[in-house]
Amino acid sequence: MLHLAPILLAGITGFVSGLLLSIPVGPINLTILNEGTRRGFKWAVFIGLGATTMEVIYCFIAFTGFASFFTRGYIKAVMELFSFVFLLFLGVKFLLAKAGPSHIRFGATADHIEARFEQVLEGHSAFITGMLRVMGNVGVLVFWIILAANFISREWVSPDWPGKLACVAGVALGTGLWFIALSWLSSLGQGKFSERTLIKLEHFSGVLLVALALIHAGTIIWQMHKASLGTH
């Protein structure tokens, strides 16, 4: 049972991060919201499954080749500090969200790539539509690279394949459950689950991320305190 603990921690880390990062209002959530209302649950859920598949692929890519680098002494300490800043940044961003898609953009080139994918979407199936919408948002891969590094440096995910795959599986479960729930709620009918409701949920996820950032900061301070005691 003791050998399962790191895998369980990695799975929970993936599940929570996948769920929290799926909630903010963005292209996928708005597409599911609109298509679920127009075409029903089945069409919306296939969009969500396509999006989940691409999200998991990006997450898997992020974990390859980065594990050993971010577990080294000073690099690990820097990533722990960066983890706090990154969580706080995301939390404040989600708390300040007002309306419309809130995914982070990475300049004109990234916007151009995303616009090209929007054109490709026309006439494709629901599953492919979901995949291409995530693939077209290059910020998703950047996010997962940053998060994967933070998870490993904080030892929430062990730098071996069992730990990384458990985290990826958790991401798949958390992301998939959110999109399925959103698909079902959107299929209930217009107005029963609106963009306004999504924004409220985004604010709630922001509160959770800020709380995680503060807990993370407290952990860093405690580790520094113990280290200082050890030097005396």
Image (cartoon, rainbow, N blue to C red):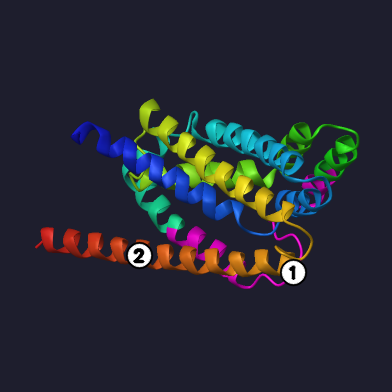
The stretch in magenta equals 84-112
Q: Quadrant of the N terminus?
A: top left
| Secondary element at tag 2 | helix
Q: Amino acid at mark 1?
A: Ala
Residue at point 17%, 61% (across, down): 226
Where is residue 202 shown, x and y percent of the image? Answer: 60, 64
Is residue 206 something that shows in the picture?
yes
Where is residue 90 shown, x and y percent of the image? Answer: 56, 61
Q: Is residue 101 magenta?
A: yes
Report whether 192 appears left or right of 65.
right
Residue 93 vs residue 122, the one in the foreground: 122
Mark 1 = which residue?
A: 99
| Secondary element at tag 1 | loop
Mark closer to the chain start, 2 or 1 = 1
In the rendered image, the vertical position of residue 226 relative to residue 77, given as above or below = below
Dot label at residue 215: 2
Quadrant of the rendered image containing residue 198: bottom right
Residue at point 79%, 53% (across, down): 37
Q: Quadrant of the C terminus?
A: bottom left
Q: Are marks 2 and 1 in contact (CB under 8 Å)?
A: no
In the rendered image, the vertical position of residue 195 relative to residue 122, given as above or below = below
**Mark 1 surroundings within 10 Å by alpha-carbon count, few (fewer than 14), some (14 through 19), many (20 or more):** few
Residue 94 vs residue 25, the one in the foreground: 25
Q: Amino acid at mark 2?
A: Ile
Report the residue that reaches farthest toward the front.
Answer: 188
